[in-house]
Amino acid sequence: VRHTVPAGMDRKESDAYLRLDPARLPQHIAIIMDGNGRWARRRHMPRVAGHRAGVAAVRSTVETAARIGIPALTLYAFSEENWKKRPKTEVDFLMRLLCRYLKAEIKTLNQNNIRLEYIGRKQELPENVQCEMNDASEATHGNTGMVLTLALNYSARSEIVDAFRSLAEAAARNGGLHHLKVDEQSISEHLYTRNLPDPDLVIRTSGEMRLSNFLLWQLAYAEIYVTQTLWPDFRGVQLLEGIEEYQRRERRYGGLGQDPGHVHEHAKVPAHAEGKH
Ligand code: FPP
């Protein structure tokens, strides 16, 4: 029996959705949105036109992820490095674009029961941007569906530094540094993502094979899917294609998995006995 398609999907999306197993969807998808600049250059347009076009890709991806019931989606909107190394005009444009997106999107986020969160060193962003960010997350605070996390001024190494500081401060408050407990669980609990499961799938657009300082701790076991599609051309259907590829892969977490090559000879079922009993 084929599963039913969520309302509002076009033909291509429905076809892609029907190829998925709805029982094995990734619980958290992280996306490195790359290629806005190249998209614009190919059209002889300024880089910022690529960022503007990237907003439509964000909308489509967020809506499709929510519709099919993905519990968590995290988008790398800009890194600490982007923010410090790009010309001020481009950074200012990205800030304005973000504020406009946050204001315009609250209604759709609420309609889709999406809660908005952030990761990154928010306190280093301009005051007015922080204000818009707080307003948007407060306006969606009561939603119980998908958690959409925007990584803004984010760096995975800074996050780990902040986690160690926060661990040490917590120990100091609780009676001194000899109370410091460092293990995988305590580190995870002090990361910005403490309330999220680790991503099962990370998608990167525009063909680059790098993690670029994104969720380094959390992506330890994630499947990596790289598509040549430039971010402004990415839509819900490309998200579904990424999930399809994810479902084709076998996840082993360091174990041996189901590959018959790993099974001991004596444990193998003889071919002639298969399906007989
Ligand atoms: C990468 O392309 C993209 C960015 C640094 C910015 C991402 C921003 C958006 C998609 C729009 C605004 C975001 C939200 C959440 C509304 P690039 O400039 O590095 O492209 P290039 O590698 O081709 O130069």
Image (cartoon, helix red, strand yellow):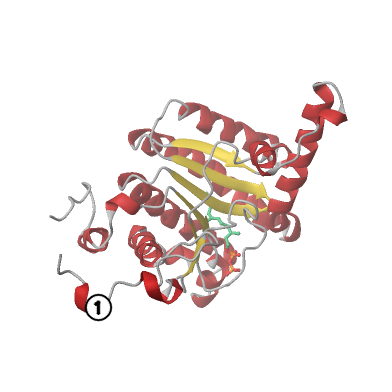
For the point 48% across and 42% down, which residue is it? 148
Q: Nearer the viewer, residue 68 or 80?
A: 68
Where residue 182 appears, x then y in whole percent?
75, 40
Residue identifier under label 1: 271
Q: Is residue 155 visible?
A: no
Viewport quadrant of the C terminus: bottom left
For the point 49% across and 75% down, which residue is it? 43
Where residue 29 appears, x then y in whole percent?
47, 52
Q: Is residue 120 visible?
A: yes
* 219 sits left or right of 62 in the view: right
Disc 1, SS: helix
> Number of callouts in the render?
1
Q: Nearer the viewer, residue 151 or 244?
A: 244
* 186 sits left or right of 136 in the view: right
Q: Nearer the viewer, residue 179 or 219?
A: 179
Callout 1 environment at 10 Å: few (<14), some (14 to 19), or many (20+)?
Answer: few
Question: Which kind of residue does numbered mark 1 sit on?
Answer: Ala
Using the rendered view, name the quadrant where residue 229 is placed.
bottom left
Q: Does residue 226 sit above or below 23 in this rendering?
A: below
For the point 54% across and 68% down, which residue is it? 35
Q: Does residue 145 sit above or below 272 in this rendering?
A: above
Where residue 129 appears, x then y in whole percent?
63, 38
Q: Nearer the viewer, residue 244 or 228?
A: 244
Q: Does residue 142 sit above or below 132 in this rendering?
A: above
Using the rendered view, name the quadrant where residue 108 is placed.
top left
